[in-house]
Amino acid sequence: MIDTQSTSAARAETFSDEAVRFAALLDEKVDSLLTSVEASDIYALVSSPSTDPRLVALIVKYILLEVFSYGPHVTEATFTAIGRFPKDRPDLMRPLILHDLSEVDHGEMALKDFIKLGGSEAWARGRRISPCSFAMGATCRMLSEQLSPFAFLGYMYPFETLTPILTERAQGFLKMHGFPVEAQVFIDTHAEEDIGHANLLNLLVKRVVNDFPEAAEEIEYGFDCFVNVYPLPIWSHALANARAELAGKPVM
């Protein structure tokens, strides 16, 4: 759910030069992260028409498993951070709460697609979280609980701005590989919804830095911490699991 009042209000808002420059800096950092993703082995595999479609399906399957694993931790961390915002700023808290609320069931959405791809629900719910998802969830929790409450915007910004780009591309790659469309509900949802989420995050980052200039340093630190644990470390783990299953040694 997008707070349309907040988004439309942006047309009437003006921001400090510092706030505008900082949002542009974050976009540059996202572009750099995207370049790293495009240079990765997993991106090359999924985007290549010569890759075995079975491997592509397994890569997606195990990425969805990790989404199910880390998703609740990201959601809880985000609610914690928002709860630590200055209590005289419900105008900042409200759209962020509504945004996080719209995300709470997305781990379950990922699990449903994981099951459609042959995954075991009982195993997924009962297994110990992978170390890479643990690191990602722990990073989000530390940023939200131990640092400035605004630091969480540093992990949420790349999360929400990179996702619509990559999921839209994934739709084309998966169609090329004959991926079962009934198992890409999670991907299709994020290719559409996260465009609005990205715009909302850009607006709210500018609002925060406009009113709390010291938050810029905290947000950038959060960004830099987050990109050390997401997305490539998690995707690399998913690729290893996919290759193991294709070789007849499934992790389940």
Image (cartoon, rainbow, N blue to C red):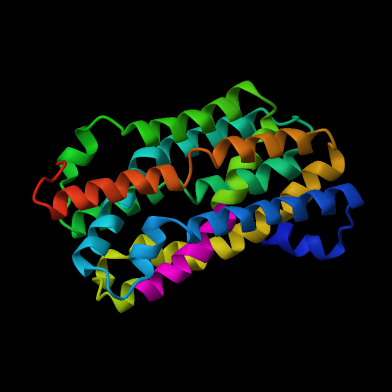
In the rendered image, residue 19 lying in the magenta stretch gets the answer no
Q: Is residue 137 left or right of residue 202?
A: left
**x, y percent for residue 167:** 45, 64
43 vs 95, nearest the viewer: 43
**x, y percent for residue 231:** 46, 47
Q: In this view, does 63 lie to the left or right of 120?
A: right
**Residue drawn at (32%, 51%) of the image:** 64
Q: Is residue 41 left or right of residue 183?
A: right
> What kind of secondary structure does the magenta stretch mostly adopt?
helix
Looking at the image, can residue 16 be seen?
Answer: no
In the rendered image, residue 168 lying in the magenta stretch gets the answer yes
**x, y percent for residue 208:** 78, 42
Residue extending furthest toward the left: 248
**x, y percent for residue 50:** 27, 74
Asked if residue 85 is positioned above or below residue 180 in the image, the reply reads above
Asked if residue 214 is positioned above or below residue 35 in the image, the reply reads above
240 vs 113, nearest the viewer: 240
Magenta stretch, residue numbers:
160-173
Looking at the image, can residue 73 be seen?
Answer: yes
